[in-house]
Image (cartoon, helix red, strand yellow):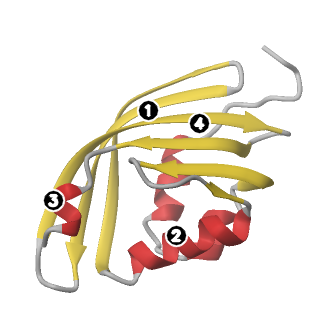
């Protein structure tokens, strides 16, 4: 393992995400970090990532990530989980997801890819 890499705390990452603070979420990323959510366009840079997160958080009363499996190999973290959404519309939605995180510079995220079918989220 590269000595500049440490174990990434995926549970802490999702616990922070679940607080629904877009700028705090974006601070996990390297300044030029990239996020791809489902089939949406890639977001590059903390401001774009924060804006995407905020657009999702604005629709929610609560979000909760459940990590089912996670493994880190060098600077890459693979995670399987469930995300539970409580929307302001009153809808309750749970979706399975897989993520691929590539780390840079001691735990900053260089690339975060979320594989999920968000159709039920956007159809309620």
Q: In this view, does 3 lie to the left or right of 36?
A: right
Q: Which element is circle 1 on?
A: strand
Q: Which element is circle 3 on?
A: helix
How many residues crowd mark 1 within 10 Å: few (<14), some (14–19), many (20+)? some
What separation in Å lies between label 1 and label 2 (alpha carbons)? 21 Å
The residue singled out by tag 1 in the image is: 79
Mark 4 / mark 1, whichever is N-terminal = 1
Q: Where is residue 101 in the image (x, y as percent from the top left)?
A: 59, 36
The residue singled out by tag 3 in the image is: 120
The residue singled out by tag 2 in the image is: 52
Dividing the image into 4 quarters, which one contains the N terminus?
Answer: top right
The residue singled out by tag 4 in the image is: 101
How many residues crowd mark 4 within 10 Å: few (<14), some (14–19), many (20+)? many
Residue found at x 44% / y 44%: 114
Dividing the image into 4 quarters, which one contains the C terminus?
Answer: bottom left
Give the number of the mark in front: 1 or 2: 2
What separation in Å lies between label 2 and label 3 (alpha carbons)? 18 Å
* Cβ–Cβ under 8 Å for marks 1 and 2: no
* Cβ–Cβ under 8 Å for marks 4 and 1: yes
């Amino acid at each position: 393992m590269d000595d500049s890499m440490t174990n990434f705390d995926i549970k802490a990452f999702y616990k922070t995400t679940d607080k629904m603070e877009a700028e705090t979420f974006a601070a996990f990323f390297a300044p030029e970090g990239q996020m791809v959510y489902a089939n949406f366009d890639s977001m590059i840079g903390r401001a774009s990532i924060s804006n995407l997160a905020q657009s999702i958080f604005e629709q929610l009363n609560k979000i909760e990530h459940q990590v089912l499996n996670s493994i880190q190999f060098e600077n890459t973290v693979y995670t399987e989980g469930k995300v539970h959404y409580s929307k302001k519309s009153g809808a309750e939605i749970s979706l399975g997801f897989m993520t691929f995180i590539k780390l840079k510079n001691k735990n900053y995220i260089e690339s975060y890819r979320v594989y999920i079918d968000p159709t039920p989220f956007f159809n309620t």
